[in-house]
Image: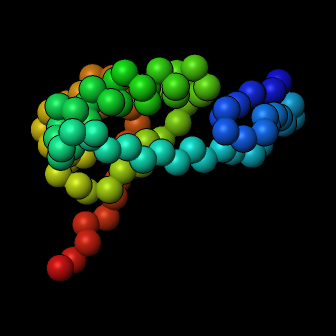
Amino acid sequence: MQYYWHDLRREPEIYSTRQSGGGSVMVWAAFCASDGNQNSERYIYTISEYLLPFIDCVYGRECVFQQDNASIHTSGATKEFLKEEKVDVMDWPITPH
């Protein structure tokens, strides 16, 4: 099985998976609000409209979501949304001040 990604600014790349199992893939993403500060509502919108469809397409939700303890990540609204969507979120340690 192969996955294809093409950034129009670069040469095409093809990624292969192992047929016998094993291995893993880490996807890193960052995003920001284009017209001001990011808040929980915008964060949830971005996740629901862009990140989760990508995850569903590529991994079928068989993944662990990792985020730091930024307030938009730990808000009640965000936690409830991720719980409703059955997103497995990795615990992130609290940084002592």
**In the image as oriented, which residue stretches furthest toward the left?**
76
Display colour scheme:
rainbow
**In the image as oriented, which residue stretches furthest toward the bottom?**
97
* x and y, in percent, of residue 58 in the image: 61, 25
Splitting the image into 4 quarters, where does residue 10 fall? top right
Q: From the image, which quarter does the C terminus lie in?
A: bottom left
As drawn, is 60 to the left or to the right of 22? left
Query: Which residue is painted at 38% across and 43% down in the image?
Result: 31
- The residue nearer to you, when weighing 19 against 39, is 39
As drawn, is 52 to the left or to the right of 34? right
- Above or below residue 9? Residue 53 is above
As drawn, is 30 to the left or to the right of 44? right
* x and y, in percent, of residue 38 in the image: 21, 43
Q: Is residue 42 visible?
A: yes
* x and y, in percent, of residue 67 in the image: 36, 50
Query: Which residue is painted at 40% across and 37% down in the image?
Result: 88
**In the image as oriented, which residue stretches furthest toward the front?**
9
Q: From the image, which quarter does the N terminus lie in?
A: top right
- Above or below residue 26? Residue 60 is above
Query: Which residue is painted at 23% across and 55% down in the image?
Result: 70
Splitting the image into 4 quarters, where does residue 82 fall? top left
Splitting the image into 4 quarters, where does residue 89 fall? top left
* x and y, in percent, of residue 11 in the image: 78, 39
Q: Is residue 21 visible?
A: no
- The residue nearer to you, when weighing 6 against 30, is 6
- The residue nearer to you, when weighing 67 against 36, is 36
**Total of numbered circles in the picture?**
0
Query: Which residue is painted at 33% across and 30% down in the image?
Result: 46
